[in-house]
Image (tube, rainbow, N blue to C red):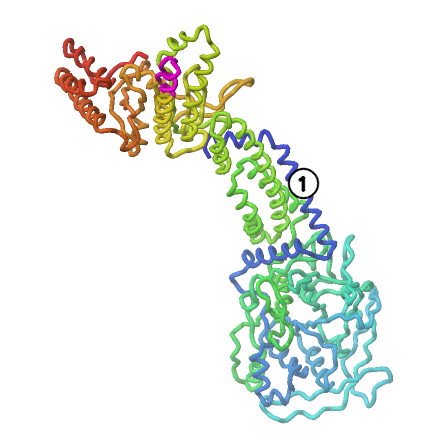
Amino acid sequence: MTGERWKTVRSRWRDHWRLMVGVAALATTLAAAWQRFDAKLGGGWLEAAERSAYDSAVTRFTQRADTSSQVVLVTIDQQSLDEIRGNAQYVLNFGSWPYSRNLWARVVEQLEAEGARAVVFDAVMDERGSDESMDLAFAQVLRNTDLPFFLGVSTHADARPLPPVDFQAEPPPPPQAPVEADAPTPGEETFPEEAFLEEAGSETFLDAPTAPLLPAVTPEQFARALAFPVRTEGRPLPWLEYEDPSRKRQPSHPVRPIPVLVGAVAGFGLVDPEADSDGFMRRTRFAYSDGHNGFATLPVRVAASLLGASAVELSGRTLRLGSRTYAVDADGSAGIDFGGQMHARFESVQLFKVLDAWVHRSKGQPTELPSGVFRDKVVVIGGNAVGLNDVKATAFSSHEPGVVKQAAVLDTLLGDGRFITQAPLAVSLALVFGVAFASVVLLMTTRWTPLEIAWPLGLYFGMGWVTGPFLGLTNTYVLTALPALAGVVASVSAVAFNHLAANKETEFIRQAFSRFMEPKLVEQMIAQRELPRLDGENVEITAFFSDIRGFSTFSERFKDDPRNLVRILNTYLTRVSAALLKEGGCLDKYIGDAVVCLFGAPMRQADHAVRACRGALAAKAAVDQLREEFRAQGLPDMFTRIGLNSAVNFVGNFGSEQLFSYTAIGDGMNLAARLEGANKAYGTVIMIGARTYALAREHIEVRELDRVRVAGKTEAVTVYELLALKGGVDARTRETVTRYHAALALYREARFAEAAAVLEARRAEDPDDGPTHALLARCQRYARTPPPDFDGVANLDK
């Protein structure tokens, strides 16, 4: 940014900073009110935009390169379904999907043999199998194994409520292992035991023994098994509820598992999807309440058991399980750190391969499972076949198996403990205000149209690149759509102010310049937004100076009739000014009979030198016509002289608080004035400087007059007489110019007599040529008395 541009920016800040702060505060308030209103409506455009921004940030900045070291998956994929269906022995022993529960007994046995830390079954078992002996056999395996097995629990509006559990009181005795009996006691539930597969690959089963009896599971025992102690400080747990068709929230309750599993399973946990209204899984809560008891989610229940936690503790923005603490949001929830798609985040083994390994192990054969794949890891079993209808959406994929949620939450609880949390509202609002303030300051101080368009678009599409890296570093999500919205609102306000200010400046420009510029040129300047810098700037322009020769003598003729003198002078100025305005000149000022005009400012004109030359020739033609009119009226003759010079000058408004005008100052202006006066010494009408000639040479005819040194300057400059536009010189004048240039070359070589002879020969053919007379007189004088230290430069005193 140039120094002048920076001054303008600082000036605008100084004049409007209070307004900028107010606009930013208003934009912040409006955005926050919109968010609150959006939330009351149950989600709208802003919530959808925030979710989209969150998903984008999560996928870009939280994806992990390594797989989990805590959790491994056993997947019920389509190939497993096909392999089990295609194996006659498997079909005989386990049936078709959903398989009998002795299949899961074999899986548990194999995982125990592989050294797994625990098994988590991401499903529910709340319906008895067609052969209840299979259920009992599965429960017996779980009781006999040292491998903890955790099972999911769903909720339903029709489920029977559970009684309150007092975890401080002595717990009731758990259901005992099955015992043989001839007949069940009335009111008790019994389960026949299934014969286990004796040898893999055989088609024989052990005979079923006498049906065992399991003591009845009371509601209190169900409640004790499903509920889990949850301690909160000043925050109620979210209720187990659902939304009915009328959109009212209705209570729901945990669905009781089959009684045989109570006391056999290490723990139960909720497996409801916890999806947002758009169906995406993004967040999780860690515990719920039915109004009496607390219920942990399945990953929390597993982690609590493995970490030795006797309760789930929620306090402020902290979750505690035993000695481990986790940062969560103020409402007790947290964002799930999926870390990528399931196949990239977790190592997985297909279900049929685990079954095959059990068969091989039972035969004493080596298994084909990867070495140590399950050792010391928590194994989560879940389906990912399309036909199992457990497909959910996450930020990473719209078709992820639901098991990925349980696995991701459990991996975080057992691993680094970093869930994705929301930044405090105060932090997000600070960012909202900061973005709004930066937007309004940037646009109101620069007032650059491309930026007015690009900045709001950049906020809308690029805000995530500000909050996203912060999320990747800290696992903290700062609101993204809300700051973008506030920034856009502030930007629109700033643009509106800019246009209002621009309209005022435009009107000022129109009023200020319409008096000394052609109106259509003023409108063109405004339409093209080529407004001048009113505080001044350095610009290359061509300055025009003209004056009436012998005006003092001319005016003496009217000393007794000043009114007529004013009329004649006004006529002269009007004609000259009209010729200059037509070529795009900007009238600077009138100084008596003198006219000062600028080309190239305030409106930029790449061809300002050409325009100035055309304007000068047009002004000369207008004066020639006026002379004829004055002669016909018996008025004195009028003769004008013109000086043109192109240079970088400082242009802008100059003056006092009472009066100022748009003009230019600089050496270039002074030289133009000197060239106008120098016409007298050469008998010329229009004299131009070297820079003007260089810029316009392709469009004009000139005569190089001399090299001169004006008063007050030591540097010599080449000056030219402007004769006509290109091709406008007649043969006689062209011959005169040719002879003059030849004589000028001899003169610069100090061959004064020879130069005089060349000029003398031409004088008779063009007796009215002023430059010929001037140079001839100088050559004759120097031929008689050669000057000392001659350098070919003429010194002009005025």
Q: Specify the quadrant that holds the C terminus.
A: top left
**235 or 170, which is in the foreground?**
235
Give x and y (percent) for residue 416: 60, 58
Magenta-drawn stretch contains 634: yes
Give x and y (percent) for residue 278: 66, 63
Q: Is residue 225 visible?
A: no
Q: Which SS class for mark 1?
A: helix
**399 or 306, which is in the foreground?**
399
Give x and y (percent) for residue 691: 31, 27
Give x and y (percent) for residue 617: 34, 26
Residue plotted at (67% across, 57% down): 334
Number of callouts in the render?
1
Q: Is residue 109 visible?
A: yes
Q: In the figure, residue 791 lies in which quadrant?
A: top left
Q: Residues within 10 Å of mark 1 (few under 14, many from 20)?
A: some
688 lies above or below 228: above
Residue plotted at (31% across, 24% down): 689
Residue occupying the far top of the picture: 560
The residue under label 1 is 26
In the picture, measured across the screen, residue 745 lies left or right of residue 587, that is left
For badge 1, the amino acid type reads: Leu
**60 or 624, which is in the foreground?**
624
371 lies above or below 231: below
Region in magenta: 626-639
368 lies above or below 237: below
In the picture, measured across the screen, residue 413 lies left or right of residue 606, that is right
Magenta-drawn stretch contains 58: no
**355 or 430, which is in the foreground?**
430
In the picture, measured across the screen, residue 702 lies left or right of residue 252, that is left
In the picture, measured across the screen, residue 543 lies left or right of residue 98, that is left
